[in-house]
Image (cartoon, rainbow, N blue to C red):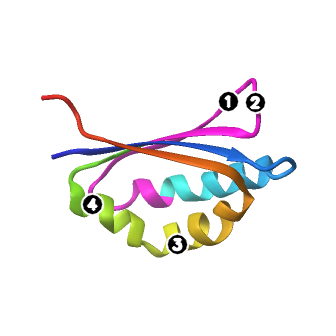
Amino acid sequence: MTVVLAVTWVAKDGESDAVAELLRKLMPLSRAEPGCLQYDAHRDPDDRNAFFLFERYADQEAFEAHGASSHFRELVLEQALPLLASRQRHLLTPLV
């Protein structure tokens, strides 16, 4: 079953451009993963510190592979998370 993840990041003051650059690097790497159906990052036009990520994976295995990938560990866990004031993740499954 498809796995969907909706994520909101809020960058710490002064860190939003660095977060945006990390997301620009992360998107093509994530989209190239087997089982990644969609990986889009957006920036709030009214609050430049706020970002919204929408991710779709073919199944739980693809979702777990994304979280175990070297680019996720490096760009998200090691580099982006320290720049964030908050991170909210919502794991969703489609209605059938």
Q: Residue furthest top?
A: 46
Give the percent coordinates (x, y) of residue 92.
31, 40
**Separation (CA) of disc 2 from disc 3:** 26 Å
Helix, strand or loop at label 1? It is: loop
Residue 80 coordinates in the image, percent (x, y):
66, 61
Residue occupying image coordinates x 67% and y 29%:
44
Q: Are marks 2 and 3 in contact (CB under 8 Å)?
A: no
Q: CA distance from mark 3 to mark 4?
A: 15 Å
Q: Quadrant of residue 25?
A: bottom right
- 81 lies left or right of 91: right
Under mark 4, the amino acid is Ala
The circle on residue 84 is none
- Mark 2 element type: loop
Under mark 3, the amino acid is: Arg
The Cα atoms of the two marked residues, 4 and 2, are separated by 32 Å
Left/right placement of residue 60 relative to residue 12 reads left
| Kind of residue indicated by mark 2 | Asp
- Residue where numbered disc 1 is placed: 44
> Which of the two residues, 70 or 92, is positioned nearer the viewer here?
92
Say whether marks 1 and 3 touch (CB < 8 Å): no
Residue pointed to by mark 3: 73
Residue 83 at x, y percent in the picture: 74, 59
Which amino acid type corresponds to the residue marked 1 in the rendered image? Asp
User: Is the Cβ of the residue at disc 4 closer than 8 Å to that at disc 2?
Assistant: no
- Residue 47's disc is 2
